[in-house]
């Protein structure tokens, strides 16, 4: 029969977290608005969205991929960061996502200038 519960908290116990506040569970969507706030131009946002970059990256939080801020940080003292990121985004290097190896997406554009704009923006974060 009803074995009396050992672990259920008594009804009406005080809730230190503050009652009635909706759980703040943000969907993955805001990456884009975030990027806009961080000064990404409409063309850059459009390109990142079209190429699914937001699936794995945001500006300031690591997801499956590193945040763009941490990328900028990592390349701070690199002798040729633009060259290196351009290479990363056009040569489909092998990366590890969830312990599985896969090819990093390459931009579906051959417009070097467009890619460089994104690279410069990433490095500016
Ligand atoms: C499937 C997930 C995924 C997608 C989609 C993705 N990335 Fe990445 N990205 C990663 C991971 C994981 C790394 C880390 C790779 C490493 O350090 O080995 C990474 C690394 C990077 C880096 C840093 C490279 C370096 O040399 O440190 C940049 C810049 C980057 N991604 C930009 C982009 C852009 C721009 C797009 C869209 C064209 C994109 N990524 C799409 C997962 C992804």
Image (cartoon, helix red, strand yellow):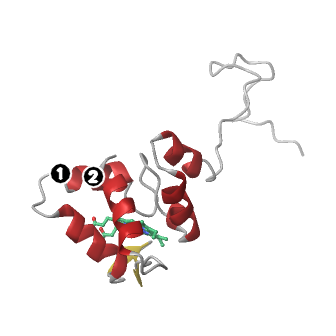
Q: Residue 46: x percent and y percent?
A: 56, 61
Could you tell me if the residues under marks 1 and 2 are in contact, i.e. CB atoms within 8 Å? yes
Tell me which image quadrant ligand 1 sits in: bottom left
Query: Which image quadrant for residue 52?
Result: bottom right
Q: Residue at the right extreme? A: 1
SS label for mark 1: loop
Looking at the rendered structure, the secondary structure element under dot 2 is helix
Query: Disc 2 marks which residue?
Result: 72
The label shown at residue 76 is 1
Please state the horizontal and vertical placement of residue 57, each as a whole percent of the image.
Answer: 46, 59
41 or 71, nearer to the observer: 41
Q: Relative to residue 23, is residue 88 depicted above or below?
A: below
Residue 35 percent coordinates (x, y):
50, 48
Mark seen at residue 25: none
Count neighbours of disc 1 (C-alpha within 10 A) and say few if under 14, some if 14 to 19, many if 20 or more. few
Which residue shows up at 44% across the image and 78% down it? 105
């Amino acid at each position: 029969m009803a074995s009396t519960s050992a672990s259920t908290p008594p009804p009406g116990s005080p809730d230190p977290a503050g009652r009635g506040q909706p759980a703040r569970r943000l969907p993955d969507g805001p990456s884009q608005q975030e990027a806009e706030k961080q000064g990404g131009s409409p063309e850059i946002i459009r390109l990142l969205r079209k190429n699914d970059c937001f699936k794995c990256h945001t500006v300031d939080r690591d997801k499956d991929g590193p945040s763009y801020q941490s990328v900028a940080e990592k390349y701070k003292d690199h002798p040729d960061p633009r060259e290196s990121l351009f290479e990363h985004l056009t040569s489909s290097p092998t990366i590890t996502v969830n312990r599985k190896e896969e090819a990093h997406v390459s931009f579906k554009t051959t417009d070097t200038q467009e890619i460089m704009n994104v690279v410069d923006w990433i490095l500016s974060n």
